[in-house]
Amino acid sequence: MRRYGKNPDEDDIRSRPNPKGNRPRTHTRPKHEDAEDGMVLTVDRGRLTCLVEGRTVMAMKARELGRKAAVVGDTVSLVGDLSGDKDTLARIVRIGERRSVLRRTADDDDPYERVVVANADQLAIVTALADPEPRPRMIDRCLVAAYDGGLSPLLVLTKSDLASPDKLLEAYTPLGVPYIVTSRQELENGDAADLVREQLNDRVTAFVGHSGVGKTTLVNALVPKDRRRTTGVVNAVTGRGRHTTTSALALPLPDGRGWVVDTPGVRSFGLNHIDPSRVIHAFPDLEPGTEDCPRGCTHDAVQPECALGAWVVAGHADPARLDSLHRLLATRERREGD
């Protein structure tokens, strides 16, 4: 064994190569100028199915994206094998800017928001008039999420042969939400799809609703070549259906004029991520009345210094619209079963 004195000659010292030093770390990221653009159709356990120039490509997220996740509806840039052949895998290296985002939390105490779908233009809220019974608070929560995320709402009421829609529509007419009323027979024979399809042209529409309301049945009628398994019965004790759609999936309409995104049935729609001050933007007729409100005013019914109430009383807007705003703002503070 060789020993060195106090002043060894540097030329005599052998240095071991650093196996981790061959590729020095850098914050410079590759530009991937050859990446091709695509759209995320569905996500399943870390694998993303994307549409790239008419081909269905399986991909995974690049490590350089960190914790940033792609969701259904995202526009992405991909590299690697984009042939779409079996057992091939591409890599998502960029996620495009989102023009709209539908988000929710598990409940109002959950600090972690979940992005349901990106870049949708419209949110179709599917609600049965009976079997299971409608839950207006759930509708209100979906409306708040739609307004906050930049989506236009559409109310789709099913099973009108079991109950009248009049009472439910009375609560939403002041909101100006467009609606469609269908029966079970219309769902089964496809007439409901014809009614809804008129509202979907040239748009990306996300469908949300409780299990058992006929959401997936409607989606199957809209896109018959990509049928999804539907729920069979509604539980007689709980009044709820069983989840059959387990992941969101974007499907093109047969005429190529739009997309539908079928999402899993939900039993709760938390709004912990919503800033109440942004809900007023869904009421352009009321916004001028907020000019004299103090900074940080949420415009709810319990805000003592809110100037909106006096402005409406003075005749500048319909009081029913203000009541609707207050109801939606109060929705965030209520539990789902209220």
Image (cartoon, rainbow, N blue to C red):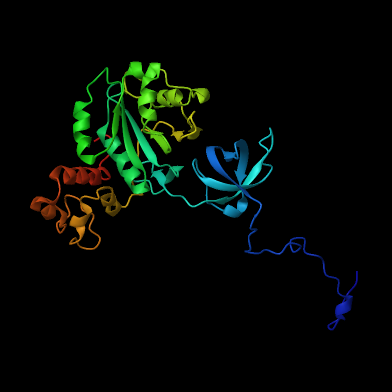
Q: As drawn, which residue projects farthest toward the right?
A: 1
- Residue at position x 20%, y 51% from top? 286
Above or below, comparing residue 320 to residue 314 in the picture: above
- Residue at position x 61%, y 54% from top? 64
Can residue 90 be seen in the rendering of this structure? yes
Count the labels in the image.
0
- Residue at position x 17%, y 46% from top? 322
Question: Which residue is nearer to you in this view: 318 or 147?
Answer: 318
Please state if 34 lies on the left or on the right of 262 as rendered.
right
Can residue 233 be seen in the rendering of this structure? no
User: Residue 45 occupies which quadrant of the picture?
Assistant: top right
Q: Percent x, y for residue 92?
A: 60, 47
- Residue at position x 11%, y 54% from top? 310
Q: Percent x, y for residue 164?
A: 22, 22
Q: As drawn, which residue projects farthest toward the bottom?
A: 7
Q: Percent x, y for residue 123?
A: 37, 38
Question: Which residue is nearer to you in this view: 309 or 6?
Answer: 309
Q: Percent x, y for residue 192?
A: 36, 23
Q: In which quarter of the image is the C terminus?
A: top left
Please state if 107 lies on the left or on the right of 308 as rendered.
right
Please state if 106 lies on the left or on the right of 169 as rendered.
right
User: Residue 265 occupies which quadrant of the picture?
Assistant: top left
